[in-house]
Image: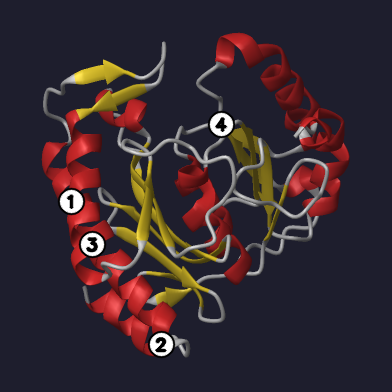
Amino acid sequence: MQRVTTFAERCVDRKLANIVLAAGEAALAAGSLLRNLYGKPHRVSHKGTIDLVTEADVAAEKAIIDHLRKACPEINFMAEESTTLPASMPETPTWIIDPLDGTTNFAHHFPWFATSIGYSEGGQVKAGVIYQPLLDELFLAARGCGAWLNNDKIRVSATDTLQESLLATGFPYNIKETVGDVMSLLATILPKTQGVRRAGAAALDMAYVACGRLDGFWEINLKPWDTAAGLVLIEEAGGRASDFAGNTFNLLHHDIVVSNTTLHQQLTDLLASHSSAPHE
């Protein structure tokens, strides 16, 4: 908890400081719950053929919403397990919550998952928290306050060529319908890099770009709760986010690429022909 209060004390915007304080406390509470449930038998149901939900997703979301409702009762919610995706981003203050990013990993006892909480106002993400409970790594960011990992300020990498880069990607749940596009993207980018990782939790991929462990990340068909917290982390750490065509990213875009900024044009040059932007 000390790392959350320390960040809040550093943040010059007192409203956002309180937002991050509430989100950080909620993320830590949900992370403790997930850590206790990890490795145990799970009740698994399906939202789609390979889109899983466990009792841990539901319990973690309830814990987050209960905490945030007490801390900030005036703020609305957009949460993965209990909210329908809106046609447009709300202008009103809104929490954007993924209680368990990496559910498939969690269900298979693969230790790579996180809780992600973003805060949006005026249709723009203003703050975000991502927590990896097994590594006890808490990523915190707010506009004008920087991006932090636990008690250390973070910055994107300085890698300036794709050949020296380590990138990440993910595969959408409708992979049967999109496998051609996914493999075409991979075939375009993989040979030009030092490596591409696919670990299965977009929020953590974005957090890892923010702290310089990865140099870039791309994926198609993500939802606002996958990207909200990571977006502000990336940008406050000096990185850049866009759609594949290089347009300013918003949470309802169908494709996203984030990078350390120096690689961004190189990536969008490769990705632009796959952009969904003309069809939005």
Which numbered mark, 4 or 3, is in the foreground of this view?
A: 3
Do the residues bearing badges 4 and 1 touch, measured as CB atoms within 8 Å? no
- Residue 32 sits above or below residue 273 on the image: below
**On the image, numbered disc 3 is attached to which residue?**
69
Question: Tag 3 or tag 2, which sits nearer the N-term?
Answer: 2
Which numbered mark, 2 or 3, is in the foreground of this view?
A: 3
Mark 2 Cα within 10 Å, few/some/many (few <14, many 20+)? few
Q: Secondary structure at mark 4?
A: loop
Q: What whole-number distance in Å separates the C-alpha atoms at marks 4 and 3?
A: 32 Å
Choose between 108 and 143: the one closer to the eye.
143
**Residue 144: image tag:** none
Mark 3 Cα within 10 Å, few/some/many (few <14, many 20+)? some
Instruction: Give, as a three-letter code, the residue at label 4.
Output: Gly
Question: For the point 45% across and 38% down, which residue is it?
Answer: 201
Choose between 75 and 12: the one closer to the eye.
75
Instruction: Give, as a three-letter code, the residue at label 2.
Output: Arg
Q: Secondary structure at mark 2?
A: helix
Question: Tag 3 or tag 4, which sits nearer the N-term?
Answer: 3
Question: Tag 1 or tag 4, which sits nearer the N-term?
Answer: 1
**On the image, numbered disc 2 is attached to which residue?**
14
Q: Is residue 26 left or right of residue 77?
A: left
Residue 211 visible, this orientation: no
- Residue 184 sits above or below residue 98 on the image: above
Question: Tag 1 or tag 2, which sits nearer the N-term?
Answer: 2
Q: Secondary structure at mark 1?
A: helix
Question: Tag 1 or tag 3, which sits nearer the N-term?
Answer: 1
- Image position, residue 1 (x, y; %): 21, 73
Mark 4 Cα within 10 Å, few/some/many (few <14, many 20+)? some
User: Quarter holding the C terminus?
Assistant: top right
Q: What whole-number distance in Å separates the C-alpha atoms at marks 3 and 1?
A: 10 Å
- Residue 59 sits above or below residue 21 on the image: above
**On the image, numbered disc 1 is attached to which residue?**
63
